[in-house]
Amino acid sequence: MTRGRKPKPSHLKAVQGNPGKRAINHDEPEGEGLLEVPLPPEWLHPYGIQMWERVAPWLVSSKILTVSDMPNLEAYCAAYARWRQAEEDIARNGIVVPGLNSDVKNPACTEANASLKQMAMFGSALGLDPASRTRLAVPGAKDANNPFKDLVGKKR
């Protein structure tokens, strides 16, 4: 096993930027960005489908989502669905539930925590949390919200 940070794939360097100006491996197979939003998998829970429909269009329009990222998106949406179901169970039954001899922690609390960790991991891989989103250099994102974008390069 190698030590240190995993090397960033070349197609992500193009999207996220290459501030260290490290050499790009031109022999590396490139992931093609998807041109249209893929349909969610049939097995996905309705909560996961809702999240898919919220997140996938942004990932495609930002040219982040590639075919190789699909499992990350599926895992993120599945974890979101499990988290929602666990939170509903906690709301319905409480944090503590009756056990054999005494009250015990609701097992849904454990599942909610595990699902949140999975969401954080897969969401970070997709650029869905604030920290990883700041590392993404989405083409045109800076210019879209810049009120002075039309003034750049113009002389008085």
Image: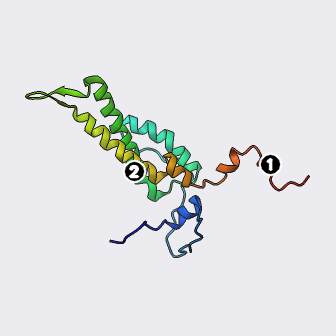
Assign a secondary structure to mark 2.
Answer: helix
Residue at image position (43%, 53%) is 70
**Residues tagged 1 and 2 counted as in contact (Cβ below 8 A):** no
Q: How many labels sit on residues?
A: 2
Residue at image position (41%, 52%) is 72
- Judged from this view, the residue extending furthest toward the right is 156
Q: Which residue in the protein does label 2 denote?
A: 121
- Distance from Cα at disc 1 to Cα at disc 2: 38 Å
- Residue 8 position, x and y percent, is 49, 65
Specify whether 115 is left or right of 10.
Answer: left
Instruction: Work out whether residue 77 or residue 18 is closer to the camera in this orientation and state it.
Output: 18
- Residue 34 position, x and y percent, is 54, 54
- Residue 27 position, x and y percent, is 51, 76
The residue under label 1 is which amino acid type? Asp
Q: Is residue 150 above or below residue 112?
A: below
Assign a secondary structure to mark 1.
Answer: loop
The residue under label 2 is which amino acid type? Met
Residue at image position (26%, 25%) is 94
Mark 1 or mark 2: name the one nearer the start of the chain: 2
Mark 1 packing: few (<14 Cα in 10 Å), some, or many (20+)? Answer: few
Specify whether 27 is left or right of 40.
Answer: right
Q: Which residue in the protein does label 1 denote?
A: 150
Which quarter of the rendering shows the N terminus?
A: bottom left
Instruction: Work out whether residue 39 or residue 136 is closer to the camera in this orientation and state it.
Output: 136
Query: In which quarter of the view is residue 14 placed?
Result: bottom right
- Judged from this view, the residue extending furthest toward the top is 92
